[in-house]
Amino acid sequence: MTEEEGYILRSRRLISKPPVTSEKEDIVRERAFKGASNGLMDLEHVINRKMELKRKAELLKSELMKEVDIHFNEFVNNLIDESTVLESSSNIYPASAEKDSHRSRLRPPPEHGKLFVSRRSLLDELFEVNHIRTIYHMFIALLILFILSTLVVDCIDQGRLVLEFDLLVYAFGKFPIVVCSWLCMFLSTLIIPYAIFCTWARGYKASSHRTTRSLIFGTLFVVFQLFIIGFGPAYIVVQYDLPPASRFILILEQVRLIMKAHSFVRENVPRIFSFTKEKTAAVPVPQLTQYLYFLFAPTLIYRDHYPRNPSIRWSYVATKFAQVLGCLFYAYYVFVRLCIPLFRNISQEPFSLRVLVLCIFNSILPGVLVFFLAFFAFLHCWLNAFAEMLRFADRMFYKDWWNSTSFANYYRTWNVVVHDWLYYYAYRDFLSLFGRRFKAAAMLSVFTVSAVVHEYVLGICFGFFYPVLFILFMCFGMLFNFILHDRRKGPIWNVIMWTSLFLGQGVLLCLYSQEWYAQRYCPASSATVLDYLKPRSWTCHFHMDESRSDFFK
């Protein structure tokens, strides 16, 4: 065999051998692929685990922020309510060091007085959140549906569009009388209490009969409060037979001016008592411009100076007044679409327990809508509009009353403006006179004052005495105040509070509306006092015309 043939033979043997190395490489590749697959599965598991942990962390974060926010709000509110030392030690808004020392010397603040700070209204902050603003849009959509339904029904019934707004025209009738009466009320409140206080203050230190002097001028002030500003508007309302909305304007302004005049005197009298112990000759009498600003400011607690914003946002003012106007039309359509058909049908049936129960539950929806509209129109829009025009920076006219789990907290947060006045001038003054042992009696006195004033307003404005609200205030209000107290926490108590609130609105709207129409369509058989005090809706079966305008009047 030649050398060439041997080379060829060896080459063929090598080619014919099985590819051992190739099989080993396949095994290695397969193991590597399995390892890579396992690695990818482990990586995906780790990623899913991290995402799950992230979601749990976000949930814990939101719950933690809620708890922190609740405790922080409580801390800030307690700090504001108990910051007497801070207020007395320094003036928060001094124009200069000299003015600061002068004010602190002339203006010793009352014990545990309210501290005004710059802050926005809660709804203004909440409406910046899209989720909350959507609720506002839902109410606007409901108003559009009310308008459309009214227009469609009028077109079907009468064959034309009816845009008369007869309810609003009737309710705000005789408005020139309201304007003239308000001007007289306002000017008398501006001039008379200020003149009485200044005359008493400037001669008090030099007087040898200070007690007699104080009794004389105090009597003059009480006479003004009771007979001039107290009796005058009520007489005008009855004498000129003003319609309901016009009556509400005058009577509510009457109550507001009485409370403002009381606050002005109550806050400044201690300054004069402190002044008599000092050697200074300057009498600490506030300027008339300060009192004038207070009469327009959206607060019932007098201060010489309030926190002020640097400028006025007129677009914000226009928006708030437009929202007030929108709420008026909203209330109009609520009465037209929900109240008139209800009471038109009820008026054709004799009074019975079944009719009363159905009326109450059918009145809950319109009653709650009117309740929301009154809150939004007055406590948010109207007060914020005047605060913006006056550059009044403290906009806490209400708190988060909708989150209340107790009626005690609801009473404190629903209307902060009135609550502050009742707290400092009714509750705390009662305790200062009779001692801290009588806290229950002090609370009872506050409820009594509030109930009497509310019933006075409704009695004068509706033109009849029907103490439904007084009974709800003094009986159920006091009872719920002790049963649903601040120790009641949890969502179930918030549900109970809302259920009671809704039912109360239905009771008020049903009973007062029935009595309103009974008073007009069932005149008293005799003119005795008992006949006027007895509810006519319980014994009267009356029938009204089907027209809408006749139903209002």
Image (cartoon, rainbow, N blue to C red):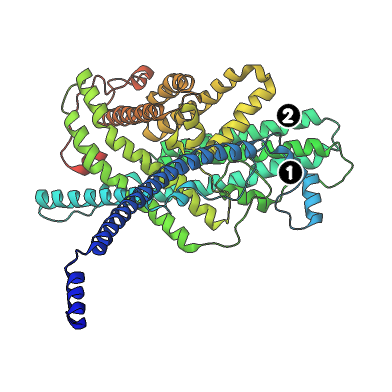
| Residue 442 in view of the camera | yes
Q: Quick one: SS at disc 1?
A: helix
Q: Nearer the viewer, residue 530 or 71?
A: 71
Indicate which disc, 2 or 1, sits on the residue closer to the N terminus.
1
Residue 154: mark in rendering: none
Residue at image point 44% right, 21% down: 480
Residue at image point 42% right, 52% down: 127
Q: Quick one: SS at disc 2?
A: helix
Crowding near the residue tagged with mark 1, few <14, some 14–19, many ≥20 C-alpha atoms within 10 Å: some
- The residue labelled by disc 1 is 198
The residue furthest front is: 1
Residue 215: mark in rendering: 2
Residue at image point 23% right, 60% down: 23
| Residue 228 in view of the camera | no
Could you tell me residue 357's position as x and y percent? 24, 23
Q: Nearer the viewer, residue 445 or 204?
A: 445
Q: Nearer the viewer, residue 340 or 27?
A: 27
Could you tell me residue 42's position as x and y percent? 35, 49
Amino acid of disc 2: Leu
Give the CA separation, mark 2 to mark 1: 15 Å
Q: Quadrant of residue 223?
A: top right
For the C terminus, the image quarter is top left
Figure check: 302 above or below 540? below
Specify whether 89 is left or right of 328. right
Specify whether 155 is left or right of 393. left
Crowding near the residue tagged with mark 2, few <14, some 14–19, many ≥20 C-alpha atoms within 10 Å: few
Amino acid of disc 1: Cys
Could you tell me residue 111's position as x and y percent? 71, 34
Q: Quadrant of residue 371?
A: top left
Q: Are marks 2 and 1 in contact (CB under 8 Å)?
A: no
For the N terminus, the image quarter is bottom left
Specify whether 126 is left or right of 351. right
